[in-house]
Image: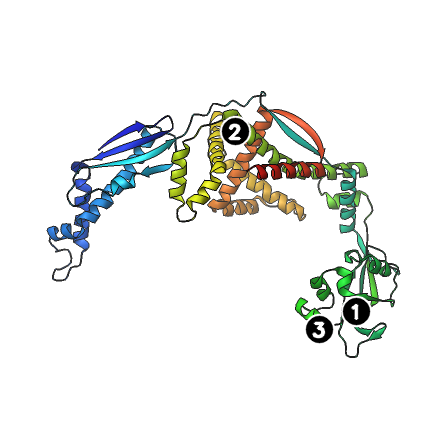
Amino acid sequence: MNIVQENKGQLEAVLKVELKEEDYREKVEKELKNLQRKAQVPGFRPGKVPFGMIRKMYGKSVLADEVNKMLVDEVYKYIREKELNVLGNPLPNNQAAEKIDWDTQTEFTFEYEIGLAPKVELDLTDKIEVDYHRIKVADATVDSYVQDIRRQHGKHVNPEVSEAGDVLFGEFAELEAAAKLKENGHSHRANLMIEFVRDEDIKKELIGMKIGDTVELDLVKAVENETEAAGMIGVKKDELSNFNPMFRYTVENIFRIEPAELNEELFTKALPGEEITTEEAFRQRIADQLSGQYQVDSDKHFRNEVMKKLLEETKLELPEAFLKRWLTEANKDEFSSEQVDSEFPMLLDTFRWQLIESHIASEHKLEVSREEITAHLGSFMRAQLRQYGQENVEQSMIDGFVDRIMGNQEEIKKVYDELFDNKLLALYKEKLRLNEVEISYDDFVKLVTEKYQAEKAAV
C-alpha cells in the first residue's frame, strides 16, 4: 500500500491511496473462509460448501468491504503519523470510486480530499484590550431584596383592616344583577391577593376592608386574565362563560406577613454561618451576592467580546471550499445545501474559534483533572445541603453523591466544560488588558441587547 499527499494550495490536499492485491488478499481470504464455515446452502452440510462457490457468491462484496475498511484505517493512520491537523473528515472521491470494476480489477487507486488547519499565531498580552463591565448594584435593588428576605422570615398575623400587601380569604358568590345574588348561583371560597389585582379601582376597594365586608367585582376586569379569573372561583377557563362575571366577595379573614426585624436572628437565618451582626454588613453581603449573580452575565458577555477580538487578531484563513463540501456531505440527511450556505459564515467562525481555543489551551497547558472534577462536585453538594441547614454532613454521603455523578459521562462532560471555561476566563482576565467600565444592571442589559440586535441585523 502506498499513500501520496498532493497539496492543493496551502490548506487543501489530496491523499492518493494505491492498493495492490497483496495488500488485501489475506484479509479477503480470511473473511471468505469465515463465511464458508457459517454458510448454509441447500444441498450442502454446514461448513462444507465448496470454497469456489463461496468466492463466486460473496467474493465481490467481501473484497469491497475489506478494501473500504483498510482505506479508512490507513488514511487515518497516515494523518496521525504525519501529524496533519485536519478539519472535518477526509472526503472520498466518489466519482472515481464508482468507475471501479470489482469483478476484474486487482489494483486500485482511491482519492481523499482533506482540509488542513492553518497555524494559529496568537499571544495573549496586554496589547489586546477588551471592555469588562463591573455591574453596580443599585440601593433600590438591595432594598427590595432585603424586604423580600424580611417577608420570607416574617410572621403571619390577622389584622382587623386590610392593606395593599394583604391576602383576603372569603366567599365569591355569583350575582344576577347589581346587589342581587343569583338563585342557585355559583359560589366558591378562595384567597384573594390584593397585590395581584390589576384594576386600580377594584384594588382600592379591597384596601381598608374588615371581616364581614363585601365588594362587588367583575372577575375578568379585576385580574385581566380569564385563566386567573376562572381559578378564583374554582372552575376551568372554558367553563368561565357559563357564569355571570359579576361576583360578590365577602371577607371572612385577613392574612398579613409582618416583616421580620432587621436583627442578628434574621441575619443568621438568611445567611447561616456568616456571622453578620449589623444591618450595614447584612446589606453589603446582599449587595455582594447580587453583584456576583450579575457578574455571571458580565463574564458571559466578556467571553463573547474576547472571542470577537481574538478572531479579529488572528484573521485565520480556512479551506472554505473543502469545508462547505464536507458540511454539505456530512449533513445531507438533515440540512439542504441552501441551509448550509446560509449558516456557513457563522460556521466558519466556529471552526476558527475552535482552533484558537485549542491553541490557547495548548500554549498555556490548560487542562481539567479528574481530581478537580470530583472536588467541584463535592463542594457543590455541600453548598446545596448548606442551603437547607445541613452543615456537618458525613463525607461518605458527599462521596456517594460524587460517585453517582462520576458514573454519568454526560454530567462529567458538563462539569469539565464548566471548569475549563472558568480557567479560560481567568486566563483572559490575567493576560489581556481589561478596560473596566462601571455600569448599572439595567444599562448593561440595554447595552448587550442593542449589540446583539445590531449583530443579528448585520448577519
Quadrant in the picture for residue 248: bottom right
Please rate how many residues cluster around mark 3, counting C-alpha atoms within 10 Å: few if below 14, some from 14 to 19, many from 20.
Answer: few
Q: Amino acid at mark 2?
A: Leu
- Residue 278 at least partly seen: no
* Residue 276, quarter of the rendered image: top right
Q: Please name the residue that numbered disc 3 is placed on.
A: 242
Q: Position of residue 399 (x, y in %)?
A: 54, 44
Kindly identify which numbered label has been placed on residue 268.
none
Q: Is residue 25 left or right of residue 76?
A: left
C-alpha span from label 1 to label 2: 63 Å
Task: Quadrant for the C terminus, please.
Answer: top right
Badge 1 amino acid: Met
Crowd class of label 1 (few under 14; some 14 to 19; many from 20; radius 10 Å): many
Whether residue 56 can be seen here: yes
Mark 2 = which residue?
Answer: 311
Q: How far separated are the C-alphas under marks 1 and 3?
A: 12 Å
Secondary structure under tag 2 reads: helix
Left or right placement of residue 351 versus residue 15 in this view: right
In the rendered structure, find residue 246 and report the number of the disc placed on it: 1
Residue name at image x 18 percent, y 56 percent: 39
Left or right side of 11 for 225: right
Q: Is residue 142 left or right of residue 360?
A: right
